[in-house]
Image (cartoon, coloured by chain):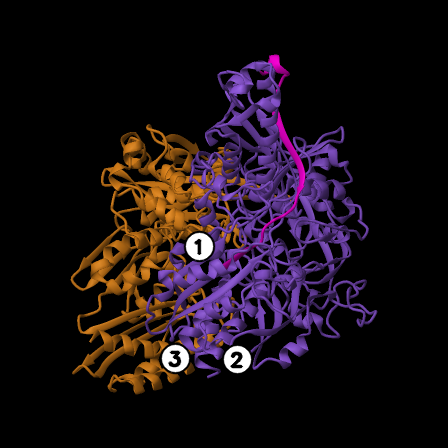
Chain colours: A purple, B orange
Amino acid sequence: MSITEQESAEMKVVGTRISRPDGVDKVTGRARYGADLMLPGMLQGATLRSPHAHAKLISIDTSRAEALPGVKAVVTRDDFKDQPSEIVAAGELPVNYRDVVRNMMAREKVLYDGHPVAAVAATSMSVAKKALKLIQVEYEVLPHVINVVDAMKPGAPILDENLRTQGDESAPDTPTNISKRVQTGFGDVDAGFAAADIIVEREYDTEPVHQGYIEPQACVASYTEDGHAEIWVSTQGHFLIRSFTARLCGLDVSKLKVTPSEIGGGFGGKNNVYGEPIALALSRKAHRPVKMVMSRNEVFRATGPTSGANMKVKVGCTRDGKITAADAVLNYQAGAFPGSPVMQASMTAFACYALENVRVVGFDVVSNRPKVAAYRAPGAQVVAFGVESVMDEMAKKLNMDPVEFRLKNAAKEGVKASFGPTLGPVGLVECLEEIKSHPNYSVPLGPNQGRGVASGFWFNIGGETCVNMNLSEDGTVALMVGTPDIGGSRASMSMMAAEALGIDPKSVTVSVGDTNALGFNFLTAGSRTTFASGKATVEAAQKMILELRSRAAKIWDISVDAVVWEEGEARPASSNAGDFEPLTLAELAKKAPKTGGPIAGHAETNVQGAGPSYASQVADVEVDPETGQVKILRFTVAQDAGKAIHPSYVEGQYQGATAQGIGWALNEAYIYDENGRLENPNFLDYRVPVASDLPMIDSIIVEVPNPNHPYGVRGIGETSIIPVTAAIANAIESATGKRLLKLPMSPPEVLEAIEGNA
Amino acid sequence: MRDYVLLYINGKRHQISGERVFQPLSDFLRYDQEMVGTKVVCAEGDCGACSALLGRAGDGTLNYQVFNTCIAYVFQLDCRHVVTVEGLKGHNGLHPVQQAMIEHFGSQCGYCTPGFVVAMAALFEKRHDLTEQAVRDGLTGNLCRCTGYQAIINATLSIKPDTVETMAERFPALPMLDAFDQHSQSSVLIEYPESIQGKTIMKRSFIPSSVQEAVLLKKQHPDAVLIAGGTDISVQMNKEKIDPQTVIILPDTPELRVLELDQENLKIGAKVRWSELEIFCKDKLPELHKILKVFASDQIKNCATMAGNIANASPIADSLPFLFVVNAEIELTGIQNKRWVEINRFFHGYKNTDIQAEEVITQIRIPLPKPEQFLKLYKVSKRRDLDISTFTAAILVEMVDDQMIKDIRIAYGGVAPVVLRLAKTEAFLKNKTFDLENMRTAGKLAREEIAPISDVRASRDYRLRLSETTLEKFFHEVSQTE
C-alpha cells in the first residue's frame, strides 16, 4: 500500500485539526480512569513495601493483620507460584518471568526500597493502612549498591548469586551484577581514529528519571467462583497485562478479561504489571472486587524509572569536519533485575551520522533500585546526552557551525545506519535545514545567554495489531482498536477511517476494545499506535469497502468489478456498468439485512515497515552566574512526522516530549540516602517543570512520507525527548564556556562549573 | 454546640459529621460522593489535579478561589461552598474554559484536565484580562506531563473574560449566605471514637467561634494541633507523619482577618491568606510582593497564612528572612493577656518557638522599610516557582552619603536549623564603604557564620557558595538601582 503525491494532496480529512471525540469527557471529569471504577462490595487494597535497599526476607507474619476487623484478605510471596527463567517480549524491553514474579512480590530477598512484601484488602483504605502496620516482617539487612559504576566493581554487593554476564566470553563464571554485554557497529574504529585530525573523548553520568505520568497506577480486579476474572486497569497494553497476570495467577489466558480504562499518561511506564496480579490474588481470597491504587510515593519508589548511566564517548574527525570514527562504552542501570534499554542505546547512539567506523559496547547492570521501565525512546535519550555533547565540542574545535557540522555528517537515505541496515527515506537533513533557517536560530544573544543544537533518532515499531470496523444500521461506523488511546489516537483513527471510507470523521466512533473483543494487540508503545493501528484501520476500511461494493453489485445485479467506491458511496464504475443512482453508506446499511447481513471490515496483522523519525532542536538559555540557575528562553523543535494525521496532536507530542527533556536536563533525578532509601519520592522534591518554567516550544512538522504507510505516517511520540538534554548542555556551554558532564544540570552543578572548585 | 460541618458542594447542601469529617475533601468527594472527576495524584498539594473552587462569604457574596482538595480536610471547610469540575458546566452547556480546552487540544491523556479547567475557571472569576505571563503564573499549581503546557496556555488566552459566567452568577449566593450566617454563630465539635488494637481514642475537631475560645481549647487540649490554612499539617497527616487526636480550626474572626497599614506598620491577622497579602502589598511592599508571586501556587496561597508559616517554624519558610530584617513583631494571645515578641527572639531552635501552651499567634506587625532603606529578598530553588527553597535571604541596608553603610541587616534561611541574622557580618559592614571589595569580604564572613547541611535540595557546599555570592549580587543590584 502506498500513495502518490497526487493522492496525498487530495486528502480531505488527514492533515486537518478536528476536535477530539473524547474531548468533552475529559474536560467535564466524566472520563473514567484506573481509580475511577466503583463496584458494589469493592475492597481497597494496599501494599506493604520494603524499607530496605537489600535484605533477606526471613519471615512474614500476617496473623495480626488478618485478625483486624475489616480485613478480608492478605497475600504474600506464598500466594504466588514461582516462575522458571523464561525470557519473553514485553513491550520495548524483554523480561524474564522469574524476575517478573519477584518484582511484583519479593521472594527470597528484597532488592530495593519500595519492593512489595505483602498486600491486604480491607473494607476501607484506613483499615487497609492499619493492617499493613500489623504485618511483622523479619529482615536480614545486606550491604547494598546504588551506583552503576560501584555495582560493576569487583567485591560489590551481589544482588543475584546466579547472575553471570551474557555475551561476554571473557567474563569469569562468578556472581556479578553485570547481566549482559552487547556490541554493535562495523568498520575499523582504531583505523578511523588513526585517520582523525581531532579526537574528542569524554565521560558522562546521568541519573535515573521517572516517567512522571500524572495518573498513578490503578486497577480493579474481580475474581468469580467459576474461575473467571476481570481486571479494569490503566495500562498501555491490556493484552500484556492479561498474559502476565494470567501467568502469575495461574489462570488460562482466555478466562481473564482485561478492560483498559482511560489512561492518565504512561510514557513507557505502564507497559508492565505491578499491582494487577496482587489485586487479583486478593480478590480470589476475599471473593470481592479489589481496587489497588498507588500513592505517588509508591509510584516513585517501585515503578519506572528509566536508566541512569555512565558512559564514555569518543569521536574522531578530519580537519574539514568529516567523522572518521565513533566509539562508546555504555554502562546502563537496569535496577534490581536485568533489562535496561542498553541495546537500544547502543543502536541509536550514532544513528544521526553517516559513519564508516563505529563501535558501541554496552553493559546491563543491576543495582538496588527499582527495576527500570521503558521511558519515551528508552535508552536513546540517555546516550544522546553524551554523543550530542561530544559532537558540539567537535564542531567548536573545527570552528564550524554545529548545524553545518551535523549536515556534513548526516545520516540520509541510502546510508548504512550505524545500527546496521541501509536507511530508506528519512528526514534528518530536512530537520537540520528547518532549524537552520528558523528565525529563532538567528535571534541575537545577550550576556550570559547561549544557544545549543542537538539531534535525535528513534526507530519506531509496528507489531501485532487487530482492529474491527462495523457498519451500524444507520450508516455510521463503529471502529474498535486494541491500543489504548494515550494522547488522542481515537481522533487520528477516526480520521484515517474517514479518509479511507470517504466520509466525515464525525460518522466514525472509535473505542478501545477489551481483551475478549479483539485478537492480541501489542502495546501502545514505540510510537506505534497511529502507525500500526492506523494501517490496520485503513486495511479494515478497504475490506469493508470491498464488501460494500459487493452489496451494491448485488442490489444492482452487476459484477463487483463494475462498482467503485468514491466519496463515501458506491457508484457504477462507468456508464457501461449501467445507470444507477449511487448508494451511500446509510442506504447500504439499511439494505444490509436483505443483501447478506451485517457489514464489517477487520484486520489482523503484524505490521511491518515502521519509519524512523529524526529530530533536531535548538535551545536558547540564560544562566544566572550567581546562583547557577538556567532559564530556557526559547526552544525550537523540528521532527519528521512522515505525515501528520492531526497536526495539533503532533505538535502536542513534540512539545510534551521536549518539556520532559527540559525537566530531565535541569532538575529531575533520583536521590538516595546512605541506606539506599529514596529521598525524594514525591513531586515536592522530585521537581517536574510547571507552566512558568517553560518557554513557548516552537514546533516544526517535517514531512518525509513513510512509504510503508498508506498516508505516510511515522511514529512521532518519542524522538523529541532525545536531543533535549544535550541541546541544553550545549547552550549552557555556549553561555558560560563550561561543559557539564553530568545530569541534571541543576543550579549547584552549574554554579560549580562556573566557579570551579572554589 | 453544633456537631456537623455545613458544606455546600455544587450548590447542594451537606451536613457532615463523625468520621467522614476527618478526611481530605478529595477522599470525601471520590469515595463518599462517588464524584470521581476530582483526581488525586500527589496528595500533598503539588500537582493541582484535585483542584476545586472554594467559595467563601465576603462583601455580601461568595468569592471563589482555586484550592487543593487533597490537603483540605472536611473539618476545615465549615460554611463553605465547593465547586468541583462536575459543577463547572453551566446552564448554557460547557464552561468557556472547558470549551476552549477542547478547541485548543489542551488535553492529551486528560488526567490533569479536571484540575486545569478548575484552575483556569478561577482565573476568570474576576473577569480580568490576562497576559500570557499571568496565565503561566496562574497555572503553576497544576502539573501536566503530556502537553508542555502550550496548548493549555493557548486555550486560556482564547477566552474572553466578559463572556464567562462567574460562580457567584451560576450558584445563587443568598441561600448559602443565610445558612452560613445562622451556622457561624455557633461553635462546632465533631467527635468520633476510633479503635485500633483494642484501644479506643476519641478524635475531636473543634471549630471555635472566637479567639478566646480557641485559646481555652488549646489549654484544655495541650496536644491539639491548631490549624489556620492547614496546607502543611494536612500533608503531614496524609503522609501519616502525624495523627492528631484533636484539631482546633482557627476561626475567621474580624480580629484574625485584619489586614491594614497604619502609618509605618503593616498589620496582618493570623487568618489572612497569602493571596490577600500578595494583592495588598503589591504597591506598598513591592519587594515582598515579588517573592510572594513565586512563593507558592494560587491553590496554596488561597489557603495558607503567614501565621502558619511562622508557627510551623521551618528554617526555609520563605517569609522569614524578610520578617527578620524588618524586625517584625508577633502578637501572641493568651487567656488573660496579649504580648508582642520580636521575631529575632521568637525561634529557639528547629521547630521550636516562643509560643506557650495557652497562646496562639493572632497578628504579625511589620514595620515598613523607610525610603532611605534598600531591601532585597532572594529565594533560590530548583525550579523558579512554588518550589521548596534551597536558600532564602533578605538584606536591608541604609546608607549615608550614598556610600557609607549606616545600618545593614542580613538574614539567611536554609543555612541552619533556624533562620539566622548574620550578626558578625553585619557588624563588619557597619560604617564601612558600600563597595564590591567590602561586600566580598563580608561574603567570606557570612560563610563562617552559618552551618548548612546537605539534603535533597542542595549540598552544603552550594549553600555556602550562595551565602557568599548573594552579598555580591546584592551589591550589583543596589548599584544598578542607583
Q: Position of residue A79 (x, y in %)?
A: 77, 44
Q: Is residue B170 left or right of residue A133?
A: left
Q: Residues within 10 Å of mark 1 (few under 14, many from 20)?
A: some
Q: Quadrant of residue B51?
A: top left
Please name the residue that numbered disc 1 is placed on.
Answer: B232
Please name the residue that numbered disc 3 is placed on.
Answer: B468
Q: Position of residue A597 (x, y in %)?
A: 63, 17
Distance, label 1 to label 2, CA atoms, is 60 Å
Q: Position of residue A106 (x, y in %)?
A: 73, 53
Determine whether label 3 and label 1 are within 8 Å by CB: no
Distance, label 3 to label 1, CA atoms, is 31 Å
Task: Pick whichever, B54 or A652, lies toward us.
Answer: A652
Q: Quadrant of residue A75?
A: top right
What segment is highlighted magenta in the picture? Answer: A592-615
Q: Is residue A90 left or right of residue A449?
A: right
Task: Pick whichever, A319 or A742, lies toward us.
Answer: A319
Mark 1 belongs to which amino acid? Asp
Please name the residue that numbered disc 2 is placed on.
Answer: A319
Mark nearer the viewer, 3 or 1: 3
Labels 1 and 2 within one chain: no
> In the rendered structure, the residue with mark 2 lies on which chain?
A
Residue B211: within the magenta? Answer: no
A442 in relation to A239, above or below: below
